[in-house]
Image (tube, coloured by chain):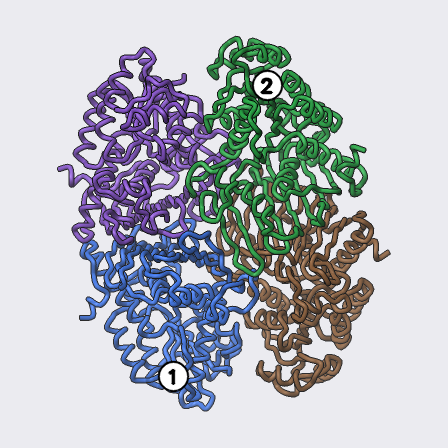
Chain colours: A brown, B blue, C green, D purple
Amino acid sequence: MRLKLGMVGGGDGAFIGGVHRMAARLDNRWTLVAGAFSGDAARSQAFGRSLGLANDRCYGDWRQMAQAEVRRPDRIDAVAIVTPNHLHHAPAKAFLEAGVAVICDKPLTTTLADALDLAEAVKRAGAPFVLTHNYSGYAMVRQMRSMIADGLLGALRVVQAEYAQDWLASDLTGNKQADWRGDPARAGAGGALGDIATHAYHLATFVTGATAETVSAETSRFVPGRRLDDDVQIGLRWAGGARGQLWASQVAIGVANGLRLRLYGEKAALEWSQEEPDLLRFTRLGEAPQLLRRGGPGLSSAAQAATRIPAGHPEGYLEGFAQIYADAADLIGAHRQGRPLPASMLPGVSDGVDGVRFIEAAVASAAADGRWVALNEGAR
Amino acid sequence: MRLKLGMVGGGDGAFIGGVHRMAARLDNRWTLVAGAFSGDAARSQAFGRSLGLANDRCYGDWRQMAQAEVRRPDRIDAVAIVTPNHLHHAPAKAFLEAGVAVICDKPLTTTLADALDLAEAVKRAGAPFVLTHNYSGYAMVRQMRSMIADGLLGALRVVQAEYAQDWLASDLTGNKQADWRGDPARAGAGGALGDIATHAYHLATFVTGATAETVSAETSRFVPGRRLDDDVQIGLRWAGGARGQLWASQVAIGVANGLRLRLYGEKAALEWSQEEPDLLRFTRLGEAPQLLRRGGPGLSSAAQAATRIPAGHPEGYLEGFAQIYADAADLIGAHRQGRPLPASMLPGVSDGVDGVRFIEAAVASAAADGRWVALNEGAR
Amino acid sequence: MRLKLGMVGGGDGAFIGGVHRMAARLDNRWTLVAGAFSGDAARSQAFGRSLGLANDRCYGDWRQMAQAEVRRPDRIDAVAIVTPNHLHHAPAKAFLEAGVAVICDKPLTTTLADALDLAEAVKRAGAPFVLTHNYSGYAMVRQMRSMIADGLLGALRVVQAEYAQDWLASDLTGNKQADWRGDPARAGAGGALGDIATHAYHLATFVTGATAETVSAETSRFVPGRRLDDDVQIGLRWAGGARGQLWASQVAIGVANGLRLRLYGEKAALEWSQEEPDLLRFTRLGEAPQLLRRGGPGLSSAAQAATRIPAGHPEGYLEGFAQIYADAADLIGAHRQGRPLPASMLPGVSDGVDGVRFIEAAVASAAADGRWVALNEGAR
Amino acid sequence: MRLKLGMVGGGDGAFIGGVHRMAARLDNRWTLVAGAFSGDAARSQAFGRSLGLANDRCYGDWRQMAQAEVRRPDRIDAVAIVTPNHLHHAPAKAFLEAGVAVICDKPLTTTLADALDLAEAVKRAGAPFVLTHNYSGYAMVRQMRSMIADGLLGALRVVQAEYAQDWLASDLTGNKQADWRGDPARAGAGGALGDIATHAYHLATFVTGATAETVSAETSRFVPGRRLDDDVQIGLRWAGGARGQLWASQVAIGVANGLRLRLYGEKAALEWSQEEPDLLRFTRLGEAPQLLRRGGPGLSSAAQAATRIPAGHPEGYLEGFAQIYADAADLIGAHRQGRPLPASMLPGVSDGVDGVRFIEAAVASAAADGRWVALNEGAR
């Protein structure tokens, strides 16, 4: 079943909007039919036309889009919200209230209050809500999740997560992507913390099935003039007794997009790096490490289901992102047709709430000289 | 400009047809609107419908498709031919003669006579013809080509190419993909030779701008019962004086899709491996090796133009393949609109002829105990 | 000049004693001539004979050895102390007081009081004291140090150090090496902390020239029954403003000896891993990473001086350790002959005191729920 | 038992002499006591003194050394011959005839006639003869040999060997090491062929237990003025039916010492690279690759016996070379004491003869435009 997609944000010069569109196209499950690509109606239309959209479905205002779309017989099945962080909550809520499923970029919102409010809205609406923690779409990430769920690691001991980049190692004032990410009003309380540490945190929770109980954080702003952190170093105490560090940095010269997860249990260990996403290193206690590969032998059905092409034909970032859209089509399609919803690994609004709790706890800890702060402390 | 694509072959159970469709979709330049997916009209229609195609554009016969499509006002702009090797020549020629641009899988044909005949047909038709030596779509492959064209390596000395896989390491009789590739009537005179050695050979020619003058080949059939080679070991003497080896194997256990090129010149060297396509190792004489990365610093405009997302967000096989389709859209779109054709790096029919010459020369050499055979010897 | 070496500890079944002996032999600067290999005189003699030593120089007591050796005309020039941690202080002090230079294994002592006392003893004796933080002997570690001293990284921002192993991932009670390392009476207050985290910490200080001001530590004992930590996760605030994490673990299944240092400055970055010690990744802001290699182009004189064989002929752990012994021969030889002491990068007693401060601060922080503890706090 | 070693060659400025001395020292099995380090007696003495040798055992002439040493009660147990290739045969023969065991550098001789003559001399003398194909001393090379002997790979299909370096990528006239290696009078008929291709060939034979039946060779001299090959590309037909390529080059910019072996059998495969000698990749048909590591789990007794320190503490080139000396001490010690000789994996004179046959066959093939030449063809 092919579904119809609308988009809020993602116009000229945006990065992630284009990614969402490629991801939505790849598996032929979605057609982009509508968008509020810009607050300027003319620009929105010009951009929409460049994508082959009909003029009357290119809106200058997402509120208007929500209202107009739900009245159409060929209405969108879901809307992708790809705006800066501060513009997630309101449009997401508006579409949910109009009965439209939402596919929203991360972090969920800029405040925990907004996050909880949105979670309520999702609950009321009963419509699917998908948060694009896209790294959970990688086949080998799902392989890790399966292996841990199957008990192959035994009790988890150590969770080492990191997400390093270098694109903000110098002052990029004037760069559109850098500007909003460095502006508390648009990004929220976290810089690298919200932009990438939340990915690393979500990845660890997605794979292990556990959540952190408390965090101890040190945040830095290394580039002069920066208003939000560009480097965060966090200790985590995980439910179940595991301990771990999480490092996220946007000043790590020479590291392009270094999201990496290493998990050590009592019986085995897993190591995965996003820059070689098709590979996974698995070591049982007392045995030689094995190199599992997407498409290769020894994989779980979950990993196989997230695979398009044979081993050694690399799948990359867009394929991982596309998996989120493919799964979302299964979920939202079933919902639209009133069928039972399929089991799904998709990150949803509760992952988003957890992510915002993680951000707020880390900010609070850093402000308190690294005191261990509970993730649900801000919510009390 | 978005173009309309037809497809010959690529129905249920085919591998490469699905790849072509994903590649065509990714960059939003093509819409698949027609197809002869099967020789059985009902199956073709069922498959086409599953892709969202109109019933009347799902054909059971590619001849009929060629005739019907060119009469339509919304006719296809190009046809993708994704059938087994022996079914490239006839449909390609038919569509060309109908005035339809062709995007054809490799190797071009199963005989040199057919290849030359098709080259004539391309010339007569004046329509674009693209051969999907897809590895030439990778950004870092184009980076190598730019660097060599810019003289950074100086005179080439050594060209080491290899393409190893393991999927045919045991007898796969009954596997549809294996069966036609192992059948001389459908695959032509080469097994691994036609299927993958031609990719490695094309890659080397694409990057270096040179062609081999003579080859000395040793072909083996290691798996009992196999009728075509599953391992070929070739020496090449390149125009310009470089020397090199080419190894292609489908019995190399533990190697998934190991296409690799290493080039040593008098001033510098390049090393690239398809399994990590975003990386390129470049070493100048007397200096430390540099690791160039797609999306990173120091890249040519050609590499930048074949890039979708930032460094460290891996692009893979499908993106490289999509680049061929994006470039083909530029080329074929210009042709359809009567505009001047853009400069293009796309492999075309002459690359296909060279590939078949390479196959025939290697087969002849192997039959003559490794005698050095000129690539154009068979054509005399 | 060849020097004469004595050894305390390192008899049958010891690991590090054999390493010291191989390291001392490799560069032909030392001859082992005496030893107190065991507290049992007969066993000490049997072991010494197996090494080719004269009977009368194999002692059952290191005190006796110190007294006897200094009276000989062919006395040892230095003594290597390779006993468990709790047996460093007393013999080191005794030999120093007898006027014998000391080459001592790390960590320096099991308490800060002992460390400071030994530092006083070194000062009084005026004899060279070398602490075998052997990883500082690697050529590429010295290369990093040179590059940072030369300002190539600019102001340091992030220091990520780790030292992971897996040999203690399960209960090894009864294993001699594991037993003393897990016994507070013999190992001191730290398990992994003293055994390997101190190496990682020293490496970072050696390379950067900086020291940590405060640490925040989380220590774990994952294997049931263990009395000392087998995993430590530490935050560090470095003098000069850099921030960093240090992880040391002996339960990291699949990691053999993963000492790794990553340094990010405002102008460039360095990444090094002990398991491939000949390689060093260096990236300048805005440029492609370079792979420096021991013996290859672009190296400092310090790195060249710590190189025996050409690039690509791997030097390993024993060569790095041997460099400590070679440098110690230069230093101790000069001292013995009354010549001016050469400039030296050798770790000494003050590094040892810093290491013990680091252990004590980490233990104190862990006991105080991760409070930031100053490294010199325990000394006040 | 410690043995006494003499040395012919290896004076000031030599490379491999120093390597032999470090290798002999490392495991404490040999003491260097005599040498003819130079044809000039004064220089030989000066150099020997710098090593701590007695004056009367530093000779200006190896003939004189052979005669003098065997008359001494403390005579050498073996002589290491580390001269350029043309000076292997005569001193080796002289020492053998004097009853002294020989440890000789490779290739054995510069002509097959000399090689066969030396083999006769070994036979007549009955003394051990060791050829330092040092790469056979690596633990993981021996691991490969064990695994193949145990049948883990099944019938061998493909043997890919290569040995690339870059140190001769430009004209090094005046460099002592380069000069003799490029001089047919001193090096023999092969440049890269004799210097490094023979290592790669020996490695393949050592590991597989097979020998090549015929070779087809292409040799090049890429650097102007060079008189011997600096790049060789060889096809091999192995006894037992395997096929393979061997590439050796000294103009491969960016490759330091790239000796690499890849073996594909019907049941499994092995891949090993000298630049990371502690690692071995092993893949069984249909399973994920395993990364075996020296000192780690799953190793043969042969690999364990060639291991000094734990996994992850890298052993390198000198340790591999030292293994040859350690094994030679076992062999030669037993011979000297009249004990039964231990089983040994040491390369001997027959390996040397095979290597010279390999060189001569390759030269003959290259001269005959790549005709397949039998390795024993020159011997008929």
Pick the front one: B65 or D200: D200
Q: Mark 2 — residue? A: C8
Q: Quadrant of the N terminus of chain A?
A: bottom right
Residue B336 shows up from this direction:
yes
Q: Quadrant of the C terminus of chain A?
A: bottom right
* Residue A106 figure quarter: bottom right
Establish whether labels 2 and 1 are both on one chain.
no
Q: Which of pointers 2 and 1 indicates the residue nearer the eye?
A: 2
Q: Quick check: A310 above or below D4?
A: below
Which structural element holds mark 1?
A: loop
> Which chain is home to disc 1?
B
* Residue B260 figure quarter: bottom left
Q: CA distance from mark 2 to mark 1?
A: 86 Å
Q: Position of residue B169 (x, y in %)?
A: 37, 51
Q: Mark 1 — residue? A: B100
> Which chain is home to disc 2?
C
Q: Which mark is residue B24?
A: none
